[in-house]
Image (cartoon, rainbow, N blue to C red):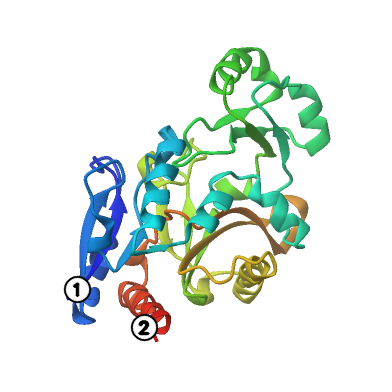
Amino acid sequence: MLKIASLTMDNSADFVIDDELAYPHFKALGWEIIPVSWRRTDVDWDDYNLVLIRTPWDYQQDPDAFLQTLERIAKSKTILQNPLKIVRWNMDKTYLRDLESAEVRIVPTLWGDASSDMPLELWFEALQTKELVVKPTISANADHTYRVRPDNIAAMLPTLHEAFRTRAYMVQPFLQAVVTEGEYSVFYFNGKFSHAIIKTPAVGDFRVQEEHGGDIREARPEATPHYEALLEQTGKVMQALKELRFGTPMYARVDVVRLSDYGEAEQFALMELELIEPSLYLRTSNGAPERFAQAVHDWMNQKCD
């Protein structure tokens, strides 16, 4: 039986992971899945036919060490997916600039480095918003993500200065559509559409992750206004990857929000493109676990032909 290392973390007890739903389908196709922490240094990566970067959701705590692990994997005889080139690019959210240059519409964004000032009043004006979201350019799980309003600038500044003392950051308008409707995620396996979900935050919160109380459900065509536009616009993101010479990733999650805040209900803006270790929410759609296993299997067959 062929072997896949599913790259994960030491302790996943606080996270919702459903990758195991795909394991029986992998087994039926002749693959054994073995979870392996990215922090382990005693692994012989040559023992595996494929390494899938799946749930190392603490890598942002030490991105340099994470990259070193991936570099060791890339130098071995195994195959790393998604590839190191994509990971390096996708690790820092400044990749959004590249996608914007490829005519992908992104949420309006300002950028700051660790040494820069934080002129919050000017940011409100520049982004034409009454509320800001400030977060690191390298982050996951909404870590160090803050909402700022004109009435709490004084209270938030010390927190922001401490949080971004050594981190580059990005500033975006807080879009009410995230709260009133939710954030959409659209999934592509080996370039083919698999399923879509909508994530809504808990009452009083703005973070849509389950770990923060968010609600997750499948976004179905009959219940999603302008569903075809959603797929068309996320498909353009996947096409932009090809134009940027990254090819077709084995797995991708495209996170977008409807631009109803701007009176454009048929338009969606890219929030993030997750190509490293996205939660795939396989449990939300009938057949998604099988589609994922089949996509990986087919890709490997094409690679080996």
Tell me, for residue 262, which label it has, or none: none
- Residue 6 percent across, percent down from the top left: 29, 58
Q: Residue at x 71, y 63 (%)?
A: 267
How many numbered markers are drawn? 2
Q: Of label 2 and label 1, which has the lower sequence position?
A: 1
Q: Residue at x 76, y 21 (%)?
A: 119
Depth order, front residue of 122/110: 110
Tag 2, which secondary structure? helix
Q: CA distance from mark 2 to mark 1?
A: 19 Å
- Residue 262 percent across, percent down from the top left: 76, 52
Query: Taking 222 as reference, is 170 left or right?
Result: right
| Residue 260: quadrant of the picture | bottom right
What is the quadrant of the C terminus in the image?
bottom left
| Residue 115: quadrant of the picture | top right
Image vertical order of residue 87 relative to residue 167, above or below: below
Answer whether residue 17 is visible to the viewer in this image.
Answer: no
Q: Residues within 10 Å of mark 1 (few under 14, many from 20)?
A: some
Residue type at mark 2 is: Asn
Q: Which residue is mark 1?
A: 24
Q: Residues within 10 Å of mark 2 (few under 14, many from 20)?
A: few
Tag 1, which secondary structure? helix
Depth order, front residue of 171/85: 85
Residue type at mark 1 is: Pro
Q: Which residue is mark 2?
A: 301
